[in-house]
Amino acid sequence: MQFTVAIDGPAAAGKGTIARGIADRFGFAHLDTGLLYRAVGRRTLDGTPAAIAASTLRLRDIARTDLRTPEVSDAASKVAANPEVRSALVAFQRDFATREGGAVLDGRDIGTVICPEAHVKLFVTASAEVRAHRRWLELVEAGHDTSEADVLRDVEARDARDSVRAEAPLRAADDALLLDTSTLTIDEALDKAAGAVQTVLESRT
Ligand code: DC
């Protein structure tokens, strides 16, 4: 069976948690596509030109454990605006999306560009303040010394860059289900998302 779930939305809206939860519940494979851009951004910090970093990306680059720092977030957001980088990463994502057994991909352009034919499309969002608070808690827990105000500024800067770029800007697909997680618990958000997936799966049998 091929079944693709596309989950898009801004940073720290909860799409990664929802994507992993959907993958667990339904036994689908999961790809966090932000890791591809983070791995390319990381390699540019080491001196590799962005287009070369993207076209020679290996699985071990994505498995690095240093891809979640603010420095790499910033580099990822910059390389994500580069059309050569984006096109070098398309085939890998589409192959993943059409694998047997079902796949969940989360990112910014999955429902609009990578998988416009996805069976389920979700656009997960939350207010900038709520997202900055969540990201700040994650960073503090990981031992980073940063203020909530700085994280909010970063979140807003990245939102602006991701939304206004010419190439695959962040936006909801016309047929995406909007899920605002600002006032939802993780379980509530996941239940809503899983309900949407279940409905489409049942309609196919
Ligand atoms: O989801 P994230 O924070 O790990 O994403 C890192 C950066 O990559 C972010 O600035 C947006 C960009 N990105 C993108 O342009 N397209 C995707 N499908 C996934 C991420």
Image (spheres, grey):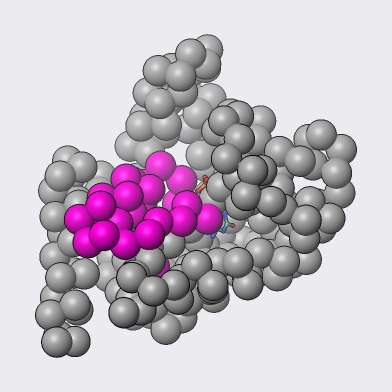
Please name the residue shown 63% across and 72% down the image.
91
Please name the residue shown 62% across and 49% down the image.
59
- From where the camera sits, is residue 157 visible? no
Q: Is residue 39 left or right of residue 28?
A: right
Residue 137's place in the image compared with 20, above or below, is above
- Give percent across and percent down for residue 69: 58, 29
28 falls in the magenta region: yes
**Image quarter of residue 131:** top left
- Give percent across and percent down for residue 70: 59, 30
Residue 179's place in the image compared with 139, above or below, is below
- From where the camera sits, is residue 100 visible? yes
- Give percent across and percent down for residue 147: 49, 17
180 falls in the magenta region: no
Q: Is residue 190 left or right of residue 124?
A: left
**Image quarter of residue 83:** bottom right
- Give percent across and percent down for residue 16: 38, 48
Please name the residue shown 86% across and 49% down the image.
49
The range drawn in magenta is 6-33
Q: Point out the image quarter for the C terminus.
A: bottom left
193 or 158, nearer to the observer: 193
Q: Point out the image quarter for the N terminus.
A: bottom left
**Image quarter of residue 75:** top right
Please name the residue shown 18% across and 61% down the image.
194
Number of callouts in the render?
A: 0
32 or 133, nearer to the observer: 32
Q: Is residue 56 left or right of residue 170?
A: right
